[in-house]
Image: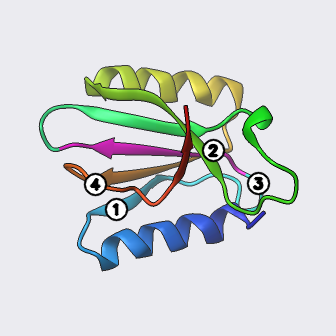
Amino acid sequence: MFRSDIWVAAFVRRHNDIGHMCVVSRRGDPLAGQIFIEVDHLNGTVSLYAPAPAAAERENQEERIFQRRFDHVEQAKVTDRLAREVDFDPDFWVISLELRQGDLGLLVVP
């Protein structure tokens, strides 16, 4: 699997290149930090995508897999979830993306 810092840089660049506002709002471990993606839908709601459980990964899979943890909720719920993550694993990344609708370009499992 790709290093976290390289994956994050590519994701941010891809979204900025197609006109989406996308930034790194928290830097984590460059090699193996977990990656969370916070999507602002520009209507007062946000969604949060987190790394999928290890059971969702397939052997020899190189693509990162995500799971939607919150869908169109108030910002406070996502902020609280990320604050709790700091206590568990402080080496995670957060990418903030503004996107009303559309494909995130992620492999998302239910």
Residue at the spot 64% in from the left edge and 48% down from the top edge: 65
Q: What amino acid is found at the position of numbered circle 4 in the picture?
A: Gly
Q: What amino acid is found at the position of numbered circle 2 in the picture?
A: Phe
Q: Earlier in the sequence, mark 3 or mark 4?
A: 3
Q: Position of residue 92 (x, y in %)?
A: 63, 44
Q: Earlier in the sequence, mark 1 or mark 3?
A: 1
- Please say if 51 is above or below 11: above
Q: What amino acid is found at the position of numbered circle 1 in the picture?
A: Cys
> Which region shows up in magenta?
33-41
> Which residue does the numbered mark 2 point to in the structure image?
92
Q: Gap in Å between the C-alphas at discs 1 and 4? A: 14 Å
> Which residue does the numbered mark 4 point to in the structure image?
102
> Which residue does the numbered mark 1 point to in the structure image?
22
Q: Earlier in the sequence, mark 1 or mark 4?
A: 1
Q: Mark 2–mark 4 contact, CB under 8 Å? A: no
Q: Gap in Å between the C-alphas at discs 1 and 3? A: 21 Å
- Please say if 106 is above or below 40: below
Q: What amino acid is found at the position of numbered circle 3 in the picture?
A: Ala
Residue 86 counted in the magenta span = no
84, 64: nearer the viewer: 64
> Which residue does the numbered mark 3 point to in the structure image?
32
